Image (spheres, coloured by chain):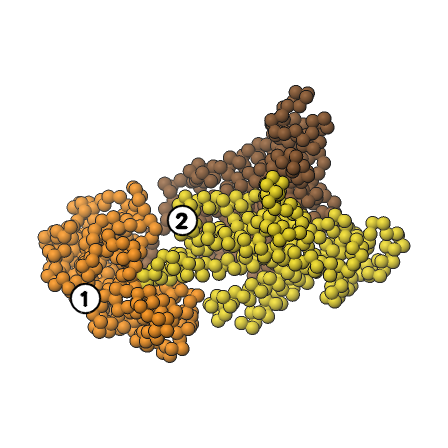
Chain colours: A orange, B yellow, C brown
Amino acid sequence: MALMTDDKPDDVALAVSNLHTTIGTGPGAVRGVDGVSFTVRRGEIFGIAGESGSGKSMTAFSILRLLPTRGRISEGSILFKGEELTTLSEAGMRKLRGDRIAMIFQDPMTSLNPVFTVGSQISEAILQHRRMSATQAQAEAIRLMEIVEIPDAASRYSAFPHQFSGGMRQRIMIAMALSCAPDLLIADEPTTALDVTVEKQIIGFLQKLRRETGVAIMLITHNLNLLAENSDRIAIMYAGQIVELAPTSEIFANPRHPYTQALLNSMPRGHISQQRLVPLAGVPPRIVGKRSGCSFAPRCPMAQELCTTVPELRDCGVGHSARCWFVEGSPRHDK
Amino acid sequence: MGSYVLSRLAQAVVVLLAVAFITFLLLHLSGDPALLLMPPDATRAQVIEFRTQMGFDRPFFEQFFQFLGRILSGDLGYSWRFQEPVLPLVLERLPATALLAVTALIFSLIIAIPVGVISAVKRDTPIDNASMVLALLGQSIPGFWIGIMLIFLFSVKLGWLPTSGWETPQSIILPAVTLGLALVGRNARLVRSSMLEVLGEDYVKAARAKGLSEWRVVNHHALKNALLPVVTVVGLELGILLGGTVVIEVVFAWPGIGMLSVQAVTGRDYPIVQAVILLSAVLFTLTNLAVDLLYTRIDPRIGYK
Amino acid sequence: MSQRIAGPGTLAEQTPPPRSAGGLSRPAEVLLGIITSKKAMFGILVILMVVICAVFSPWIAPHDPAAQSLAFRLAPMFSTAPDGTFHLLGTDHLGRDVLSRAIYGARVGLIVGLSVALIATFIGVTIGLVAGYFGGWIDAVLMRLCDVQLALPAILLAIAILAITGVSLLNIVLILALTQWVAFARVVRSATLSEREKEYVLAARALGFGSARIIYRYILPNVFAPIIVIATFAVAQAIIIEAALSFLGLGISGATPSWGAMLADGRTYLAIAPSLATIPGLFITLSVVGINLFGDWLRDFLDPKLKM
């Protein structure tokens, strides 16, 4: 990893390198995450974008080691603040989860347990990781609810999730994630289920949070527009791999991978009303067994004979790399 | 909330009226209800007198409303075999049936909940497969046969437990286990499938992401949700069991309403049969009503809808 | 809360449609499913055995099931009578051959099981389709009817009716069918409720097709899978209840041997000849387990999400 960044080690919250996560075993195993490498720095919002099934959520769950029963990390390394997570004991992982690495989920409607009060669910997270009495935890939970601006927090402590709106529930999820001042916050499609005004508020919170606490945020979304103004760097994922990785401004100004270009062409950008939107046809494949060439080739307008050979990530600018044969630059050697 | 209770109550009343009508019809199946209700050795004059007294010569629906009036005033007829009014006779046997029903249900849940939870958590492992095959077996074995086999083993061969009747506290063990075994199978499968569904929910992932132990995730966050649908089914089961577990009571000569009613059928003592059918239906309907209303208390989501 | 629609600026949130395994035809898929599942194979094997016993009982049974031999009563298993006849499973209290009676017993079980399931399917499916399709007060009335059926104590009502009307195969089948239809009605109703809102049904309505035609041509085929599964379980259930009725003395009696009646007779001799009560119970259990295993596999195979 040292090769690719000039960060001071203290600055790196998370360094994932050559991560492979498979679902199932034997010849039918699906390559959910297939050789993914990236770093997330302290105080940075790192965006991961891709269609469903591109492996972005699988990457997040690999970091927390909360994979489905048949899933496992088969190769690679996940360094969190210098600590290797792939070999850490389950008890060690449990100490990290919810304490130093927190996660918020896509659907705030379903990610809070319907049969417990919201307050007790926040307190539970606090008590899990801090030495505190139940009364202290309750006071702390109410304080957190106030931080995420839930009106009348003290009396809402004993309300049930269904008594809150979607936006309010996501704030409660954030309060829960904040309960132990994490170093890394993984937000998996945190606003997808919410409407646009609520989305702004929630993202506003995340921005404020990283400014004030320096938490590193991994913002996973299928909505590139959201990342345009709210991320520092973006990784574009396709079929389990990162196909392009660059600072946010670079991705939008100078997209190099045809997939990124297609994505940008399919969405309205800025206020250019003359722009023609080109919809992206088809769906990303699931990769089983060996890769035969570039995974995007079947949907790629530029695909040629060469694309039947698997391309590697190539550097094509400062902190900019893309996985395409038609990008000039030197192959990266981070494996 | 109030309107929900009212509509459920109204439904229960309609159902019970229909049940009353069916028990009323039962007597007309043979053509002459008077003959069915009188002792076989009654004289012709007695039958004719009884027929007029009960109004069986009146128009059909008039008879039904008379019947309704009688049962509403607590008059469920007179048993000529016991020479007693039927209602107290049946109520006297009810505690034995209720005790057996509750014991069997508790026994089944004590086994079914852990088995269902473990099966769900260890999905598709040998433990899961074995538990589910055993559960299916439990559902497939006729209760009366298992009862006889248990009597043979524990009473006849080993002499550990009484064969039948209700003389000692141990008497309840065999009938309750027999009745419970059939329920274990169904309930374990139900707990498993409900648990599997809940384990896939986001809030379970979220609970794990909080750093909770797997034990707490499963037994605190998942189980409480998974048991919600189980409550409804257990309520149904209790309702059915309270109505008399005819076959098992006969096998073990358990002095409950099931046994009483079978004796009444064999002895052609139809007022008792009628009374037990009515009482069963009332108990079933009331239990279900109670469970539905209880549900609004235990599932926080429902009370506010 | 407004649901956001995937549009420009958001990537398609969809997954590819599931592929049929190797493009097999439906019957071939079913066959392959059966062969590759131990559960299904065992179930089918048991069902076949029961069917063969029932259909070919005169050829399979070693003795006349009604032939009594008062001189050779309550013989244990593997015994040979003085006249040289061998009784694999012994003889009962009238000296009749237990194995032969058990083989003949498959007839009553199977006939009752199948006809009950058939009639219950017809009643339940009809009620469920009508309730689900027409809704409103028709639905309310039919669903109360289900409640009434569930509230009645099934076995007690059955023995009471049989005692009044007299025991016959037809009466037993009709009464048992009445205890089994509710499951069909409820499942078919809820399936119909969701089917009728789908576009192909709306399209058929728009074309002016009559309700009966829409129900039978468009909705019925789509609720077929759960019906088959419930029917399988109903066969097993009917076999158990029929045996229970025989056990209570209100089953088919006389020359036709039935497992339940054998069990009831054998119970009296539990202390001296325990096999008399054990053997018919094993036959009932084995057939019911077989049918249930098959039904269980069928449910997983046809629709893994099906909840019953």
Q: Amino acid at mark 2?
A: Arg
Q: Is residue A177 above or below residue B34?
A: below
Q: Position of residue C299 (x, y in %)?
A: 48, 47
Q: Is disc 1 in contact with disc 2, using a CB cutoff of under 8 Å? A: no
Judge if badges 1 and 2 mark residues of a common chain.
no
Instruction: Tell me if residue A21 can be seen.
Output: yes
Judge from the rendering whether residue A112 lies leftward or rightward of residue C85; answer left or right.
left
Please tell me which residue lies in front, B12 or B181: B181
Host chain of mark 1: A
Q: Which residue is mark 1?
A: A42
Residue at image point 57% right, 35% down: C50
Quick check: can you spot residue C105? no
Quadrant in the picture for residue B23: bottom right
Helix, strand or loop under label 2: loop
Q: Residue furthest right?
A: B45
Residue C145 image position (x, y, % from top left): 63, 58
Give the residue displayed 22% in from the left and 44% down from the top: A292
Position of residue C67 measured from the top left corner of the image (x, y, whole percent): 70, 28
The label shown at residue C207 is: none
Q: Nearer the viewer, residue C110 or C95?
A: C95
Report, in whole angstroms, how far the alpha carbon at label 1 lies from the one at label 2. Answer: 40 Å
- Helix or strand or loop: what does disc 1 sit on? loop
Where is residue A163 drawn, in percent x and y? 42, 72
Q: Amino acid at mark 1?
A: Arg
Rendered image: mark on residue B123: 2
Please state the chain letter of the residue tagged with numbered disc 2 in the rendered image.
B
Within-10-Å neighbours for mark 1: few <14, some 14–19, many 20+: many
